């Protein structure tokens, strides 16, 4: 069996990490020139860290599970880590921009799941892989990634060779059209983010050059 730590020891480790995060945040706030938005985020982070530390201390004292601290851990990490927060924003932006394509993909899988459920219902293929709409949708979703291709494809071929065309059309249209469309959309959004970052850095660099030039320009 794998070695495990006692709940008391893990509670002390969590408490030390929370206190360290709180001290680092307060130290950064003491020398950084933060705007109002950053000050509000820092204050929210300190409050969350203090509440988490209190919950950990009470859980150690009363030997219970720190529910509040575990709920706040994700929020604390998102607020504390700038890189993680930017990654989360990028993921949310990609999902928002790709929403229509994702809905099309899931509707495409649902259409084929209903088709194979009613088409193979009286056969062994229907009993083993498509016994319900839920099972048909799950197996067709897995088939969309080609993970269970032999398990679904070979029994259907044993029933009739013409079943090849149904699954080949499903996989070819899905993999070579819908997935490529989703990949192209994500890559386009990535290029737009890089372009926006370059333009933002160029504006900041130009602003710094202007400030320094005006400071030392005698005329």
Image: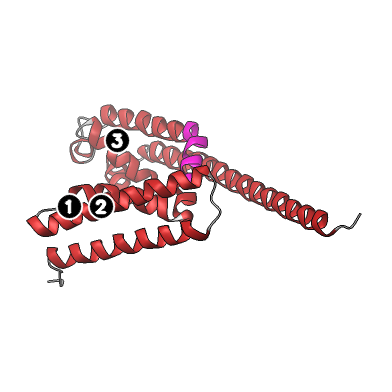
Given contact means CB atoms under 8 Å apart, are the residues at marks 1 and 2 in contact?
Answer: yes
In the image, the segment drawn in magenta is 89-101
Alpha carbon separation for disc pair 1 and 2: 8 Å
Residue 26: horizontal and vertical position, in percent? 41, 58
Q: Earlier in the sequence, mark 1 or mark 2?
A: 2
Residue in the image at 12% along x and 67% along y: 6
Residue 136: horizontal and vertical position, in percent? 27, 35
Residue in the image at 40% along x and 47% along y: 43
Mark 1 neighbour density, 10 Å: few (under 14) some (14–19) many (20 or more): some
Q: Which mark is residue 137?
A: 3
Which secondary structure type mostly characterizes the magenta part of the structure?
helix
Residue in the image at 35% along x and 48% along y: 75
Q: Which mark is residue 52?
A: 2
Alpha carbon separation for disc pair 2 and 3: 41 Å
Q: Is 88 positioned to the left or the right of 209 in the image?
A: left
Residue receiving disc 1: 66
């Amino acid at each position: 069996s794998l070695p495990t730590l006692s709940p008391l020891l893990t509670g002390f480790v969590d408490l030390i990490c929370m206190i360290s995060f709180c001290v680092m945040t307060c130290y950064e706030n003491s020398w950084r020139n933060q705007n109002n938005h950053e000050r509000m985020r820092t204050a929210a982070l300190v409050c969350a860290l203090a509440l988490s530390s209190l919950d950990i201390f009470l859980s150690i004292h009363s030997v219970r599970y720190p529910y509040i601290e575990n709920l706040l851990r994700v929020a604390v990490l998102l607020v504390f880590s700038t890189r993680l927060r930017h990654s989360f924003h990028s993921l949310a932006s990609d999902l928002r921009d790709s929403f229509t394509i994702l809905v099309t993909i899931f509707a495409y899988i649902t259409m084929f799941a209903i088709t194979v459920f009613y088409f193979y219902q009286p056969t062994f293929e229907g009993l083993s892989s498509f016994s319900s709409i839920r099972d048909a949708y799950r197996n067709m979703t897995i088939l969309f990634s080609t993970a269970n291709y032999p398990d679904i494809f070979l029994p259907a071929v044993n029933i009739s060779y013409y079943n090849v065309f149904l699954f080949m059309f499903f996989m070819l249209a899905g993999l070579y059209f819908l997935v490529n469309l989703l990949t192209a959309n994500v890559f386009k959004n990535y290029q737009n983010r890089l372009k926006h970052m370059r333009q933002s850095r160029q504006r900041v660099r130009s602003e710094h050059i202007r400030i320094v030039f005006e400071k030392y320009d005698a005329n």
